[in-house]
Image (cartoon, rainbow, N blue to C red):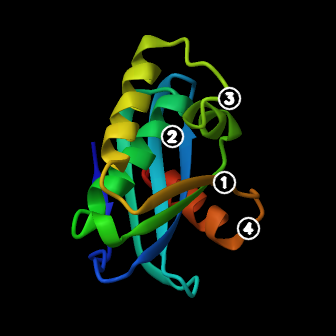
Amino acid sequence: MRESLTIEIPQSYLYYNIYTRVRCVNNPGRGGIGMVFLNEDQEKIAEHSKSFERETNNTLEYLALIRALELLNYKRDEKSVLFSLGNEGVIRQRKGINRVDNENLQKLLNSLREEEVGFNNVKYEKASTNEKWSQYAKNLARATFK
């Protein structure tokens, strides 16, 4: 497993927009997560990627969200986070619209909810696959295979 934090994430911002994307070869299979941290002016302030030996796409989606919140570990009560991700199913599961039938995914969803505790606000939206930062995060996830 390889993890790359190319820029230390500044903890001084009150608002973060985080684009997350995952890549999985053979589902389940070798995979990677990529994320880009933006400030309130939509400027890149950090990026992060990590590879995994054998996971599913949905598992990687949850792991990316959890890891992003873990990295924002200072003065959580003052921070608002907007996640922009490619998987609408995960968003619908987090909002309680879709049920989670898989036991492992339910555990990850519970972990995500626990990680959200203490933040001022955490929201989720579907990112267009053509958006600049969505593509950037996707390329970070792909680069974990090199």
Q: Is residue 6 above or below residue 112?
A: below
Name the disc covering residue 86, or none: none
Marks 3, 1: nearer the viewer: 3
30 displayed left or right of 135: left
Q: Secondary structure at mark 3?
A: loop
User: Disc 2 marks which residue?
Assistant: 61
List x then y, in percent, for residue 80: 45, 67
Marks 1, 2: nearer the viewer: 1
Q: Amino acid at mark 2?
A: Glu
List x then y, in percent, for residue 7: 31, 77
Indicate the quadrant where residue 79 lies.
bottom left
Q: Image quadrant for the N terminus? A: top left
Name the disc covering residue 97, or none: 3
Q: Secondary structure at mark 2?
A: helix
- The residue shown at (76%, 58%) is 128
C-alpha separation, residue under disc 3 versus residue under disc 1: 14 Å
Q: Amino acid at mark 1?
A: Glu
Query: Earlier along the polypeptide chain: callout 3 or callout 2?
Result: 2
- The residue shown at (50%, 53%) is 141
Marks 1, 4: nearer the viewer: 1
Indicate the quadrant where residue 77 lies.
bottom left
- The residue shown at (38%, 29%) is 110
List x then y, in percent, for residue 48: 38, 63
